[in-house]
Amino acid sequence: MQAKFEMTDGRKALTAILADFPSDSAFWNEAQNRFQFVDRLLMECLGWEHPFVEVERFDDAGGRADYLLGKPVKAALEAKREAVHFSFLPANKASSVRKLRPLVAACKNLEAAVLQVLNYCTLHGAQIAIVCNGPQLARPIRESAAFGPD
């Protein structure tokens, strides 16, 4: 599967989405955050298409993955409402790259979300874990890991 557009187009789309983010977004519940932001991020910015995005998939351990990306699964994304703030995580700065371990150690919300999504990765065979609460997005960056459709 190839992305429908270039990375620069995806960045422009993300900039537009963030610029239009309403001031009351912190009061959105998780479902509203997913509908207003995460779905748009995946489709409009990263080029994922509906057949390759599965939502609310239950597993044998009693969990429910918010998003599984790819067939076979390449990534798992755990979405939170924006009010579940990830302390010390840069927001709205595409160039901000930070090591995950100190961020997780400093923020219980981020730690809980990371542990949750890592479980989904293990159960579904995903190599990439993503947590998102709206404008804050975290994923490990590796040379060999791509985020977006092939």
Image (cartoon, rainbow, N blue to C red):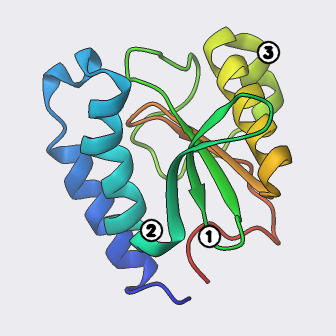
User: Closest to the observer: 115 or 65?
Assistant: 65
Q: Earlier in the sequence, mark 2 or mark 1?
A: 2
Q: Measure how far apart labels 2 and 3 are at the Cα level.
A: 29 Å
Above or below for 2 versus 41: below
Q: Amino acid at mark 1?
A: Gly
x and y percentages locating residue 46 in the rendered image: 44, 68
Q: Measure how far apart labels 2 and 1 are at the Cα level.
A: 12 Å
Residue name at image x 62 percent, y 70 percent: 70
x and y percentages locating residue 105 in the rendered image: 79, 15
Label 2 CA crowd tier, 10 Å (few <14, some 14–19, many 20+):
many
Q: Amino acid at mark 3?
A: Ala
The residue that disc 3 covers is 105
User: Closest to the observer: 117 or 6?
Assistant: 117
Is residue 128 in view?
Answer: yes
Give the quarter of the figure containing the N terminus. Answer: bottom right
Q: Which mark is residue 46?
A: 2
Q: Secondary structure at mark 1?
A: loop
Q: Which mark is residue 70?
A: 1
Nearer to us: label 2 or label 3: 2
Q: Secondary structure at mark 2?
A: loop
